[in-house]
Every structure is written in C-alpha cells, then in structure tokens.
Image (cartoon, coloured by chain):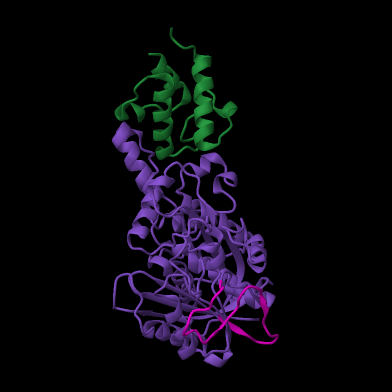
Amino acid sequence: MALTEQEILAGLGKIVNEITGIPANEVTPEKSFVDDLDIDSLSMVEIAVAAQDEFGVEIPDDQLKHLKTVKDVINFIQA
Amino acid sequence: MSNDRVVVVTGIGATTPVGGDAASTWSALLDGRSGVRTLEEDWIDSVPVKFAGLAAVDPGDVLPRPEARRLDRAEQFALIAAREAWQDAGKPEVEPTRLGVAVGSGIGGITTILNAYDLFKEKGWNRLSPFTVPMLMPNGSAGWISIEIGAQAGTHSPVSACATGAEGIAYGVQMIKDGRADVVVAGGTEAAIHPLNIASFAAMRAMSTRNDEPARASRPFDKGRDGFVLGEGAGIVVLESEEHARARGAKIYAVAAGAGYSSDAHHIAQPEPSGAGIQTAMRRALEAAGLTGADIVHVNAHATSTPAGDVVETIAIKESVGTHPLVTSTKSMTGHLLGGAGGIESVFTILALTERVVPPTINVDDLDDGIEVDIVRAEPRKLAGGQIAAVNNSFGFGGHNVAVVFTSV
C-alpha cells in the first residue's frame, strides 16, 4: 500500500533531523533543501541513502539532483 | 613584523583519559589518578593488550548527534578541546585573515577508514557516508576548527607521529612570530583505540601487556616498565601575540617562548641511543626562547614507558638543561595520546607554570638505573615563585624531536 504524503513527510522529517539537527517540524513540503534548510550536497546524499532505506525506493544520483524541495522527494517516493 | 613578536597562551582546552576538560584533567593529575582501564570491547580477545586510556568523557555524550556523525572520533576530541580553549580565551575578536589553526593528528581518522572499509565490503560503495573522506583525512580536525572560528590566515596540520601535538603548537608560535597571524588555535588530537592499532603496536612489541594491573601499566622511568599504554583525546591551546592579547585585556597563562626541532636520522621507530637529537631539540628550544638550562625548572618529559626511550631522554635533559628541573611524565596517568600527547602535555606544562606545581609520575616503584634528573614521584611538587620556565618534550616515530619552552608571566 502506498504511503500517504503525511507519512512520507513524517519519515523525511525524522531523517533530516537525525542527519542535520534541523527540527522535524521545519521540514515542510514547500521547503527547498539547499535554499531554505541550508543542507549541503554531502548531507543530501546522506538523506537520500537514509530515505532509500526507510521507504525502499532507490533514488539514482541523476534523479537526486532534480529533487530540490521536500515535495519533490515526496512525489518521487510516491511515484 | 619580525621574530621578536612575543607569543602568549590565552586559552587552554583538553579532553583526556582522566578528565573531559582541562580543569578536571589537571585535578586528576595532581591526585595521581590513572585513566587507564580494562577494555570490554567484543574484539578484546583478538589482541594481546586488553587495556587503554579511554577518554574519561565520551565525545558522543558532548556533541549533538548530527554533528558527531560527520566527524571522526579524533575530530570530535579536537573540536571539543578547541571549543573549550576558544571559550577560555574569551572568544577573541580577530580579523579572520589574522586567525590561524595548527592542529594535527598522528594517524588521522583510522577508525573511520577501518569501519568504512568493513561497510564497503559488506554493503557497497553507496552506503558509505559522504563524509568518509573529510573524516579520515588527518587535517580534518584543523579544517573543522577553522570553519568553527572563521580562521582564514592558514590552517595547518603537522604530522610527526607522537610529536604532532607539540609540532602543531610550535608551528602556531612561528605563524605569529612570522607575522602571518595574531591568534592561532594549536595542538593535537588522536583517537586510535581500535584492535588493528593495538595489534600493530603490539606487533612492534611496543605496548605494555600488564593486563592484570592496567592502572599500573604506564610506568615511565620505572625499572619494570614494559611498553607504552595507548590513550586518546586532544589538547589545544590558543596562542596570541602579546600585543593582541594585552590590547583586549586577555588573561595570559604563559609565554610560548620558543621551540626547537631535530630529527634522529637513525631508525624509523627506535630512539637514537645517545639522545643526541633530543639534546639538539632542547638546546635549540632554549636558544629560541633566549634562555639557558639554568632557567628551566620543569620538564614534562615525553617518556612513554618503553624500555628503550625513557632513560635516554633523562640523559639528554641532564646534558642539555641539567639535573635540577623537576621532571615528570604525565603519560603514567593519561597513557600515550600519540598525536594528542604534545597537545595535552603542553597544556600541563603551562598549568604547572601558572599553578606552580608539577604533577607526579605515578607507578615509579623502582627508579631505573642511570637516571640522574629529579623525577617527581608519587606526590606533586611545588615550583618556586618568580620568573620560571618549563619545557615540553615530544618525540615521534620517524625520528622527530620537538621541544617547546613556556615561561611564566
């Protein structure tokens, strides 16, 4: 059964918090990882790997660079 | 600007096997407390040495987890000690291009390398942390410290095995004397308590195997010494031009008066038996500081508790300085922090000058033959008032000898 946006968002919030220390409730769909959350490209790799483990969805490197916002990641996982 | 710039110490920080900061470490040393403990790791049966000087305070208990996970343990120690030193110095306001870093590690992020290799073999390249490289590089600590304080005058990481920490401080002093910087955060760090390191040092027959009495294993200058004891942690100082420190009304611990270097060019791991290289380094340090042997009241010796090294060092002290200084090896309590040793022991040398007391060498039950210098045994001993000077010695595999002279203010 596909996960809802809320479930993915909650999972992502936990991952981002674990990796960067940013409070999970600041991880909202419209936020850009780089511009709003100030996450660097190395941490994005960590987040992608953790997200793959959490949601069982492979995120190839050439896709990762297109995932700018939290919503982009949610859409990718749901697709 | 020239070499006549006076360099002072305005901040100190340390995390060691006997304390999580400089103050608790110092008080443990004066109490003669050993930080060496039996290891309980699951790999312990695979190595012949079953104890070490684990950090008294685990860095994972100090740093927030998101920060800790991207740092090697050696970097964690370095950042903790650097933050303490920087805070202690009053977080000096300094033009970024006049602020430097000189912090090294003898081995670097070896635990990161070994764990990453295990993970790589088990799960593949894309499960490695993207921070693996910055965690394993020996200049990682210096880089992180430079980011933390915004140091843009240059960030350096001397690597000279167990002389690394002292060489970092010596390099920092020179940066200020040369006019490249007004303030430098300097020292050394190490985190090498891993079965492969223990096995490798044990393969050299360099480590004590006194497994039934870990706290008695590090016994520099004692006839029964049988090798060094591995410790971990970091020691960092804030060095500052006297002019800069006075202008901001900083508390001044001591003058970092000068450093001397030499190299043995003898054997990759064994000390040169005459101690000539040690004498050269100590004499050059005195010369750089504009002092004579008579001015030196205390030596924090390198003495690691190996059969080959300790007595040679005391002979070199006698020849280059005299038999009068109070000599101690704090490694009897902390174990040997390798690249961190010169960092923490410089902190101890500075505190000995400011507190006018020398911590003891513990475990000297039977002083070895041929030692004619005054070893401080069992109890701390007081230093005289007035203007006094002390030396921190650090030597490393590769034949590195570094002596740093500090004077009281």
Residue B380: percent from left, percent from top: 66, 74
State the residue in front, B282 or B104: B282
Residue B268: percent from left, percent from top: 29, 70
Left or right: B381 in relation to B373: right
Viewport quadrant of the C terminus of chain B: bottom right
Residue B319: percent from left, percent from top: 46, 90
The residue shown at (35%, 30%) is A65
Task: Tell me, yes or no, if residue A36 can be seen here.
Answer: no
**Chain A rendering hue:** green
Q: Main secondary structure of the magenta part?
A: loop
Task: Tell me, yes or no, if residue B227 can be seen here.
Answer: yes
The residue shown at (53%, 78%) is B367
| Count of marks, rendered view | 0
State the residue in front, B229 or B298: B229
The magenta-colored residue range is: B364-390
Q: Is residue B258 above or below residue B268?
A: below
Residue A55 location, quadrant: top left
Residue B195: percent from left, percent from top: 39, 49
Q: Was residue B386 drawn as part of the magenta stretch in this picture?
A: yes
**Chain B rendering hue:** purple
Q: Is residue B233 above or below residue B179?
A: above
Q: Is residue A68 above or below residue B75?
A: above
Q: Was residue B373 drawn as part of the magenta stretch in this picture?
A: yes
**Residue found at the very far top of the displayed protein:** A1
Left or right: B298 in relation to B178: right
